[in-house]
Image: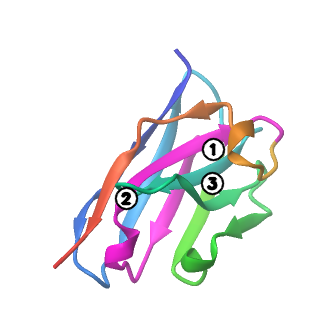
Amino acid sequence: QLQLVESGGGLVQPGGSLNLSCTPSGFSLTYYAIGWFRQAPGKEREGVACISSTGRSAEYEDSAKGRFTISKDNDKNTAYLQMNSLKPEDTAVYFCAAEPSGLCSPPLRYKYWGQGTQVTVSS
């Protein structure tokens, strides 16, 4: 079964950092763009960041700019979301997804999704 698996979530204090990982099962990420999305309780899913298949292009949601960094290591077949200066409003389930065109795209174009990893920012 082709799927993505996220890891690295957890409980962190405000101002802390987490590094989320996204690893595929059964396929290579080489030709896929990777997006990170999040969904907080009672809110709609929103895009956080995306990176093109080559890693040369990345985009960020406004609240993530300057605090989050998305990266992709095709040799390790893993994508990452480094999150620094975390705030309570960053609390959500974080999902990674793979888009087959290799370009950052709207959520409906992402073909494979993970089950999500919980990030809780609280003192």
In the rendered structure, which segment of residues is drawn in magenta? 75-101
Give the side of residue 102 with respect to residue 122, left or right. right
Instruction: Please tell me how crowded label 2 is: few (under 14), some (14-19), or many (20+) other residues with Cα within 10 Å.
Output: many
Q: Which mark is residue 95?
A: none
Q: Relative to residue 93, is residue 17 depicted above or below?
A: below
Q: Amino acid at mark 1?
A: Asp
Percent position of residue 113, x then y:
55, 35
Callout 1: SS: loop
Q: Amino acid at mark 2?
A: Ala
Query: Tags 3 and 2 in contact by the CB under 8 Å rule?
Result: no
Percent position of residue 99, x then y:
72, 39
Question: Was residue 96 drawn as part of the magenta stretch in this picture?
Answer: yes
Q: Calculate the distance from the C-alpha at mark 2 to the C-alpha at mark 1.
A: 29 Å
Percent position of residue 77, x then y:
58, 40
Q: Which residue is mark 1?
A: 75
Q: Which mark is residue 72?
A: 3
- Mark whose residue sits in front, 2 or 1: 2
| Pick the front one: 73 or 103 | 103
* Residue at image point 63% right, 54% down: 72
Q: Relative to residue 9, is residue 14 depicted above or below?
A: below
Q: Which residue is mark 2?
A: 92
Res 20 quadrant in image = bottom left
Quarter placement of the C terminus: bottom left
Say which label, 2 or 1, has the lower sequence index: 1
- Mark whose residue sits in front, 3 or 1: 3
Residue 123 visible? The answer is yes
Res 90 quadrant in image = bottom left
* Residue at image point 80% right, 44% down: 102
Q: Amino acid at mark 3?
A: Lys
| Pick the front one: 7 or 38 | 38
* Residue at image point 63% right, 78% down: 62
